Image (tube, rainbow, N blue to C red):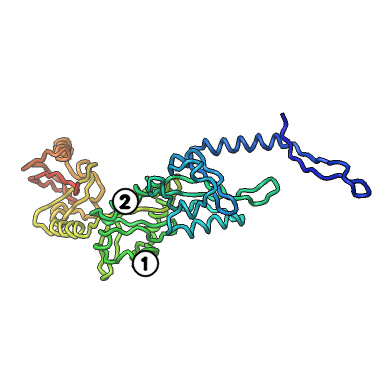
């Protein structure tokens, strides 16, 4: 069986009398088979697909569209898509997208709502593609949709959680312009959403000496390299400098493309002030006080320790306390005391000798206390 497209033309003699018919045919078997396959693929696709003719009347409505919206083919075919199935607030916008596609200007990722047969509003992400015949003439529009109702609900919930979080959270787009600014950030910094949205975070809200560093953190996150516990200052609306501890996280869309950065902050202004006060009290105490990190390297050395032992801060910081300042016969026992304290077991009234810079041996009574961070 062949399918033929025929042009039938009257045949006349020289006197104009009809003497027959001439048929000029075209074998369209292959084309029709291709169209049937195309129709089958559309109908069984796992995305809602609809089509309209040049008058905006539905002429394609696949199974996924039927399941999503609830209307059968018979209920939609020949009906105006915009007038009968689009909410009033989006009719003009959807009609514009269809009109543009009918003029050859296609649209990607257009969001609009559809009303189901049961009266439920669903959100659809649409790609509107111009439909043409074999001569290239525009014969309608095909729309390939995606139900994004659940995704938008999730995004709204995500936005709600961000906005009500008890930590300052901000976000920037790929150009560094603010697009997220939650309530805690508003309270902390003093600027409202309208005052920061679309503004460049680094240029307008970061102190000059930290702009390069903060921009580097954001740029790294935009390349997928996230940063934790980065400290930097922000200037409030009232001109007060506050210290922030930041985790900068890459923000991506559903396809995994980087669309910006979300920063979750912590106001550490009071904590840093307390630490400075703590350091000041330690440094001015009338007893020798030293501290080591988890590797046993000196990181605290107060004035009294300097006077007693003779080494300046610069001469001890970062050096191993045990290996460089304890006599060999006591190195093992002092190391054991430090190791116990690092395990949380503190020691009181431990006696051991220190060698001063001048080479004198002095006897010290030590209380070794575990040092912890805020966590």
Indicate left or right for 132 with 316 as reference.
right
User: In the current view of this chain or complex, which residue is farthest to the top?
Assistant: 1
Query: Which x, y percent locates residue 14?
Result: 94, 48
| Vertical arrangement, residue 230 with respect to residue 32, above or below | below
Residue at image location 45% in from the left, 43% down from the top: 71
Secondary structure, mark 1, is helix
User: In the current view of this chain or complex, which residue is farthest to the left?
Assistant: 349
Is residue 329 shown to the viewer in this render?
no
Query: Which x, y percent locates residue 224?
Result: 42, 47
Look at the image and tell me in which quarter the N terminus lies.
top right
User: In the current view of this chain or complex, which residue is farthest to the bottom?
Assistant: 238
| Vertical arrangement, residue 43 with respect to residue 281, above or below | above
Residue at image location 55% in from the left, 55% down from the top: 98
Query: Which x, y percent locates residue 33?
Result: 65, 34
Q: Earlier in the sequence, mark 1 or mark 2?
A: 1
Indicate left or right for 148 with 288 as reference.
right
Q: Residues within 10 Å of mark 2 (few under 14, many from 20)?
A: some
Residue at image location 49% in from the left, 51% down from the top: 109
- Labelled disc at residue 204: 1
Is residue 19 shown to the viewer in this render?
yes
Q: Residues within 10 Å of mark 1 (few under 14, many from 20)?
A: few
Query: Which x, y percent locates residue 170?
Result: 33, 57
Residue pointed to by mark 2: 247
User: In the current view of this chain or complex, which residue is farthest to the front?
Assistant: 17
Q: How many marks?
A: 2
Indicate left or right for 334 with 104 as reference.
left
Q: Nearer the viewer, residue 180 or 283?
A: 180
CA distance separating discs 1 and 2: 20 Å
Pointer 1 with pointer 2, Cβ within 8 A: no
- Labelled disc at residue 54: none
């Amino acid at each position: 069986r062949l399918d033929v497209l025929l042009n039938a033309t009257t045949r006349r003699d020289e006197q104009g009398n009809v003497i027959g018919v001439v048929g000029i045919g075209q074998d369209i078997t292959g084309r029709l088979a291709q169209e049937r396959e195309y129709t089958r693929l559309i109908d069984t696709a796992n995305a809602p697909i609809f089509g309209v003719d040049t008058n905006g009347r539905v002429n394609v409505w696949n199974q996924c569209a039927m399941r999503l919206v609830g209307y059968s083919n018979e209920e939609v075919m020949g009906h105006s898509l915009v007038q009968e199935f689009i909410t009033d607030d989006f009719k003009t916008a959807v009609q514009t997208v269809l009109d543009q596609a009918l003029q050859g200007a296609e649209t990607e990722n257009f969001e609009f709502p559809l009303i189901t047969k049961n009266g439920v509003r669903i959100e659809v992400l649409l790609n509107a593609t111009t439909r043409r015949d074999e001569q290239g003439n525009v014969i309608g529009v095909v729309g390939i949709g995606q139900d994004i109702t659940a995704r938008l609900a999730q995004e709204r919930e995500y936005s709600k959680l961000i906005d009500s979080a008890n930590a300052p959270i901000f976000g920037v787009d790929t150009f560094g312009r603010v697009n997220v600014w939650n309530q805690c950030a508003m309270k902390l910094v003093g600027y409202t959403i309208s005052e920061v949205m679309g503004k460049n975070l680094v240029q307008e809200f970061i102190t000059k000496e930290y702009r390069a560093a903060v921009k580097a953190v954001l740029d790294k996150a935009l390349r997928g390299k996230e940063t934790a516990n980065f400290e930097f200052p922000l200037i409030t609306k009232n001109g007060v400098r506050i210290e922030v501890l930041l985790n900068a996280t890459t923000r991506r869309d559903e396809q995994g493309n980087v669309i910006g950065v979300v920063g979750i902050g912590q106001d550490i202004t009071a904590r840093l002030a307390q630490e400075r006060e703590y350091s000041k009290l330690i440094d001015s105490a009338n007893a020798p006080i030293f501290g080591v990190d988890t590797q046993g390297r000196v990181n605290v050395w107060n004035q009294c320790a300097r006077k007693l032992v003779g080494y300046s801060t610069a001469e001890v910081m970062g050096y191993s306390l045990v290996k460089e300042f304890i006599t060999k016969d006591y190195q093992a026992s002092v190391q054991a005391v430090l190791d116990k304290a690092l395990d949380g077991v503190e020691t009181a009234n431990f006696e051991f000798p220190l060698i001063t810079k001048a080479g004198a041996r002095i006897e010290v009574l030590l209380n070794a206390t575990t040092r912890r961070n805020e966590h």
